[in-house]
C-alpha cells in the first residue's frame, strides 16, 4: 500500500520500532509501542479491529495500528 490511496512506511519506522497490541478480557484492543500503551480501542470498533488484525499479515497489521493511533504519514507533511 503506497501513494495517496493507502498508507506507506517509506522510512521503515514500522519495522525498526513496531507497534504491538493485545486484546483485553473485555474485548478492548490496547495498542502499545516500545512497551508503553499508546491508545485503547473499545466497543464495536474493538471487535472489528480485532477481527481485521487476526486476518492481516505483519505489514498490514503495522499499518492498521499506525492508522488507529494517528501515527501515519498523511501525505501533506513537509519533507
Image (spheres, rainbow, N blue to C red):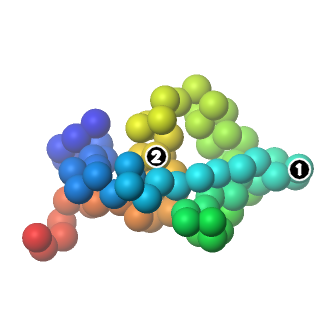
Identify the mark nearer the N-term, 1 or 2: 1
View extreme (top): residue = 55
| x 77%, y 53%: residue | 28
**Is residue 5 among the parts visible in the rendering?**
no
Residue 29 in percent (x, y) is at 70, 52
Disc 1 marks which residue? 25
Residue ID for mark 2: 62
Q: Residue at x 27, y 60 (%)?
A: 74
Task: Looking at this view, name the residue that lies furthest to the front.
Answer: 16
What is the crowding at mark 1: few (fewer than 14 residues within 10 Å), some, or many (at least 20)?
few
Q: Quadrant of the C terminus?
A: bottom left
| Label 1, label 2: how far apart the Cα atoms are | 22 Å
**Quadrant assignment for the N terminus:** top left
Of 75 and 14, nearer the camera is 14
Check the image and report above or below for 10 versus 71. Answer: above
Q: Is residue 13 visible?
A: yes
Residue drawn 55% across and 63% down? 33
| Image x and y of residue 5, in percent | 24, 42
In the image, 73: left or right of 39?
Answer: left
- Residue 24: give x, y in percent of width and height: 82, 52
Residue 42, quarter of the rendered image: bottom right
Residue furthest right in the image: 25
Q: Identify the residue at image location x=20%, y=59%.
A: 75
Q: Are marks 1 and 2 in contact (CB under 8 Å)?
A: no
SS for callout 2? helix
Amino acid at each position: 500500500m503506497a501513494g495517496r490511496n493507502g498508507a506507506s512506511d517509506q522510512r521503515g519506522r514500522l519495522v525498526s520500532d513496531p507497534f504491538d497490541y493485545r486484546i483485553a478480557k473485555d474485548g478492548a484492543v490496547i495498542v502499545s509501542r516500545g512497551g508503553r500503551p499508546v491508545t485503547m480501542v473499545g466497543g464495536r470498533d474493538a471487535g472489528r479491529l480485532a477481527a481485521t488484525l487476526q486476518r492481516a499479515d505483519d505489514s498490514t497489521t503495522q499499518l492498521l495500528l499506525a492508522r488507529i493511533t494517528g501515527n501515519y504519514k498523511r501525505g501533506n507533511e513537509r519533507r
